[in-house]
Every structure is written in C-alpha cells, then in structure tokens.
Amino acid sequence: MQEKLELSTASHNTTNKVPTSSVSQELIIEGAGCASCVGKIESVLKAVPGVSSAAMNFAQRTVSIDGDVPSDLLIKAIESAGYNVRSAAGTSEDELLDEKEQADEVYYKRLMREMVIALGLGVPLMIYSIAGGPMTVETTFERSIWLAIGLLCAAVMYFSGKHFYVGAWKSFVNHSANMDTLIALGTGTAWLYSMVVVFFPLALPEMARHVYFEATAMIIGLIDLGLALEVKARGRTSEAIKRLIGLQPKTARVIRDNQDIDISIEQVLLNDKVRVRPGEKIPVDGVVVSGQSAIDESMLTGEPMPIEKHEGDEVVAGSINKNGSIIFKATHVGKDTALAQIIKMVKRAQNSKPPIGRLADVISAYFVPVVMIVAVVSALVWLNFGPEPAVAFAIVSATTVLIIACPCALGLATPMSVMVGVGKAAEAGVLIRNGEALQTASKITAMILDKTGTITLGAPKVTNIHLINASDDEDEVLQLAASLEAGSEHPLALSIVESATERGLTPENVERFAAIAGHGVEGVVGGLSLLFGNEKLMRDKNITVDTAAVEVAQQMAAEAKTPMYFAIDGSLAAVIAVADPIKGDSISAIKRLQQNGIRVVMLTGDNRATAEAVAKKVGITEFFAEVLPEDKAKKVAELQKQNETVGMTGDGINDAPALALANVGFAIGTGTDVAIESADITLMRGSLHGLADAIAVSKATLRNIKQNLFGAFIYNVAGVPFAAGVLYPFIGVLLNPVIAGAAMALSSLTVVSNANRLRLFKPQEH
C-alpha cells in the first residue's frame, strides 16, 4: 500500500504535466501582514539560484519551496525582504501543529491585550466625541488636557500598534509597501496632525484645530481585534490535518532481544518486529510475520468491513487491529508511511494556489502603491478645492483611504477556502494534489472511465477454460498460463495466478517475458513458447484461430466475461474466460455523474462484446473497446479538441498516459504506483462516488473563493471612493477613519468565516 501512496508532487497544465524538483522545504513566516507580502516573499525566493518554485499560503503563514537549496540561504533571502522566518525541518507533523497552535494562542492573547489597551483609550474618546464634547484646542487648559491624551495615545501606538510601525519601517527600508505601511501612515498622520494642533494651534485656522487621537487609538484597537479573531478562526481550518495526525499512535511495542519494549513512534526502525494487540492501532507500515487478525482500514479505504490479515499480508499505519494479536516487520517508518504521505499530500495541496488565487496576488502587488497615490491625490484635492478647514478634511480623507484599502481580506480569500476544501475532500477519501486540480475539477464536462479496476472490482476470477484439444489437461494449461502471467501486474493476469494457486498449482519460472501493451504477454516456460492475450495478438503472431474458438469467445463476452486466447508453441491451446464483477456502487455513481451533466465515456482494452455488456449494465451509452494505452491518450486529446474539459479515471499502468494528458487525472487508490503518480487526484476508497464527491467539493470551494474575492474586491474598490469623499458634495458626509478601521477588520473576519462555512458542506449521501 505504501508504495502505491508514494505520491510525487507534480505541476500540471491542461496539456502537459512536468514533475517539479524532488527536494522541498517548508518555512514558517512571521510578520507577513497582507496579500502584497505574498508576492514579495515569493519573488525573493524565486530569485535564489536553484529554487524552481515557491508558493506562500497567506492563511497559514507558511511557504513551500522546491529546489535543492540550503535552508539558510532561503531564510537569509526572506529576512532581507523584512520578514522573520524559521524552518519547519526536523519537526514532526504533530509537533509542528502543536507548536503552531501554541504560537497562535500566544499571538491571539497578545493581540487581545493590545486591543484592550487601545480601545481603553479610544472608546471613551469616541463616546465623548459622539456626545458632542469639543475635540478642539482653544484654551491653555484644553491644550494641557489634549497633550496628556496625545501622550497616552503615543503610548497606545507603542504598546498596541508597535508591530504595524516596525513592519512599515522594514517595508520602507526594502523599498516596498504593505498593510503595515497603510496603517502606520494613516494612524501616524492622524496623531501627528493632532499633536501639531496641540503645540501650534494658532498656526492653523480656528476651524482646523481638531484633534484625531480617538481615530488613532480606535483604528489600532479595531484592527488588532480583527487580527485576533482572524487568528482564532484560521486555526479551525487545520482540523482535517489534526484528524489525520490523530490516526497515528504515539508509541509502538517492538520486540528487541526477545523482549517487548514500548518506544515512541519516531524510534521505530526499518525491519523492527512490532507487536500489536487487539484494539490497538498499527503504528507503522509493515508485513505480518506471525498471527492473524481482522484489520479496520476504513481510514484509508472507506470500507467499513475489517479485512482479514495473515502472514505475508501488508498492514498500514493508522489502521486498527480488531480481534487478534499479530507481529509484523516494519517496512516503512516515520515520514515514509502511507499515512504520513497522505498528510504530506493534503498539506501541500492546502498550501498550493489555484489559478484564480493568482489574480489576488497580481492585484495586491499593485494595490498598495496605487492606494498611497490615491490617498495623496485625495488630500491634495481637499486642500485645494475643499471647504474649510481644508487641512483637517485632507487629513481625514487621506487617513480613511489608507485604512480602508488594506488588502487583508484579499489575501485571505483564496488560501482559506483552499485549506478547508482540500481538508473536506480528504475526509471524503479524496486526495487532491494541488490547487489547480481543485479548480479544474469543477469545470469537468466529460469523464473517461477505465473498465477493469475502476468500474469493476479489478479482482476477476477464472470462470471458463475451453480447451481446443479435449485431450489436453486443464490444470496443465492453467499452470502454464499462470506461470506466464506471474510477471504481469494487470488485474486479469493476477486472476489467472490466483485461480491456479487456489487449485494448488505452483507457477514455474518464466524466461524472455515481454508485455505487449494492449494485446497480452509472451514468454518461455519449460522450453515451451507461450502467448496469452486477445485475438489481435494471435493474428499478429500468425496463430490460427478457427471459427469455433471465436464463437466460444463471443459467447463468453456476451455474458460480460473477458475471453483470452492461450497459445503453446504456435498453436491455439485454449480460450480462458475471466469475469470481473462490477463494483456495487458503480451504477449509482455513474448515474450521479450523468445527472450533473457530465458526459461519461468508458474505455477498455477488453473486447467489444464484453465492453458492451458491462457498459449496458452500468448505464453508459458511449464506450470504446480494444483500446491500446496510446489510444486512451488519443481519446482524451480528441475530447479536448471538442472543447470538453476532460477527467480521466484509471488504475493501471496502461492508464498513465491518459491520466497525465487529461485536464484532471483521477487515480483509484487501490491501483498501481504509476497511475497514482500520473494523476492529480487520488480516490482512496476505490469508489466512483469519489469522482462526484471531488467535483462537488471542487465546485463548493470555487464558489466560496469567488464569494470571498467578490466581497474583498467590492470592499476595497468601492470603499476607497467613499473614503476619498465622493459622497460629500451630495450629502455632506465624509467617512470617519474609525469606521474605515472597523470595516477593514470586519472584512477579514467575514472572509475567514465564509471560508469556514465550507466545513459544513457535505457531498451527496451515497
């Protein structure tokens, strides 16, 4: 199982799929305040020689880097851009998550403390202002009072808003601007203007002697509150990862020097013998060497029925030993277990960006500088054309524009939804490799299904052996066929071997074995030259197939069995039929896809009669039989030329080219390594309902992202003109900076809450 789950990272487009560097690192970023930080951090990392790709998840404040580059160089590059950073290497997933939760909790408490300090000053001042108290400097007494309040406000700026000003200074030093820049400029301008009023009231017109200390304190307090609530809500998006990590036990019982020793999971070594008692979890992947039991693997397969395990059978980490005591040899430990690979894949997908998310990155890169220009222009317009006190109006306008335009919500819009969506898919047994696959899955219009192992169980059984020469021995023919097929991993080949084993027949060594793609296999066993495959293989090799044999094969095919021809030393010896039962839920899953308006096509290398019988049973009207691997890929390309967004589902080596070419490739988790590595999405449960679930989750996630982006765009784009004062000529109202601060905090919280709403989404019950 582990080998099948060795899921390599790949970057895909609609026509070609190119694996990225095998070396990947994850860094934890501190100090990233808004969406514009994302582009900056990714840019400095991509500029480091050897880095092939860098993708930051703003919601998680982590960045994933592909490329064989020392971590100290990466850290240095990020620090040069003005951010604090540390490596996540050498830390277990569990420890990393705990560490992150603790850090988030500390950050949350700090922000809440800072919020209380800021609002402790801002709220009384705001109430005083609303109640009609004079916020002007006219007398010496008022000057002394406002000076004291100004100094208190400076203390608030230091204790509650220091991180904004430090962040702004770092950005300035690095010739850039971000959220901190906007907040620092907005609140700093309001405070400085107010202090000028306090110290030099006579230098300003009487109407301009207004102080804005309450705006500075309230904005800092409200933004701190928004950030605190965002941190709290953000933590809930990691629940899928938490549940996956929770599947793995903390300790294992190993046998060393003939003694049972309980050790931590990290100390288990390859080839260690591990004892597992009834009710305990399997700690690492391995092979049973002693005992037998029923193992609950529903965490991987979704199958509710426990699976009997005997000596030689594989067990996987996280599964539960139900009733027997077993000893197994550890084959994969630590980060190499199937469960660890799944966790890694889910995390990587959560950190990836769908194409729609890159739009936010592009916009935010230009947004902050544009906003600063708008703020300056707005202030100049008020100074030159506004009513008295023009200076005060200019200050208020510029401050409000700077505050309301902070693109925090824009940066959170996509990654928050992706994290929750990928987590929901993982809970449904659907492992999504990257954000691009997540987005494209929602657009699928045509779904190509392989037959064997996809629509059917992929566990066929030999049902008929029709001997051409009645004098031949059936067991001898089956033994020779099994000996030849023992070198193939095709499901039909395995069925031949298993049927022979059930009869007590032992396969012999095969020489000069060769698989002929789409046709069959050939080889030499005991000096006999053997051929096993379809009718076309026989004709290509000049094997005579008489009419009677063809009729027998056609009759078998009409009964949804797969007939195969077996030749010995150039003569047809038998027609062997194999039946592969249709999965219990394939019919309902296919119907579900069709009800969603998806064109379902079945491709198979099997003969036409068998393909037609299976297609009819499952309700598929469009199918293609006797298809070679390259023909499957051609069919994908053909549908793409018809402007179809094509999904391809398969489980075998012969499906790999088509899986790689499809817009979205779906691999059955019980399939081969090559198929899984060629696919964008892996269905761990082996059920075709996973296709509809993946598409449903994809659509829900994309809908959620669009809602978030729309809300963020509307807020920022529509808010700026109001802040600049477009309504003033009509209704005589200029937006208060405090309201802008509250709106900014609310917009981020709204985006986070909307993303978390995805956690309540449920794909159709089946």
Image: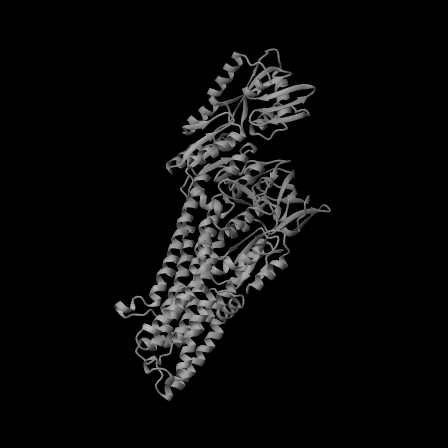
Q: Position of residue 559 (x, y in %)?
A: 47, 21
| Residue at 41% over, 41% down | 765
Rendering quarter of residue 44: bottom right
* Residue at the front extreme of this rendering: 384
In this view of the protein, which residue sits in the foreground, 104 or 708? 708
Q: Of 158 and 375, which appears nearest the observer?
A: 375
Work out which residue is located at the far left of the displayed protein and give it: 730
Q: Residue lying at the far bottom in this picture: please name it.
A: 140
**Above/below status of 539 relative to 459:** above
Relative height, residue 264 to residue 303 (above, below): below
- Is any part of residue 741 visible from this angle? no
Quadrant location of the C terminus in the rendered image: top left
Residue for point 40% across, 47% down: 700
Quadrant position of the N terminus in the picture? top right
User: Is residue 379 found left or right of 266 in the rendered image?
Assistant: left
Residue 621, given in percent of the width and then of the height, sits at 40, 28
Q: Nearer the viewer, residue 575 or 282?
A: 575
User: Residue 734 occupies which quadrant of the picture?
Assistant: bottom left
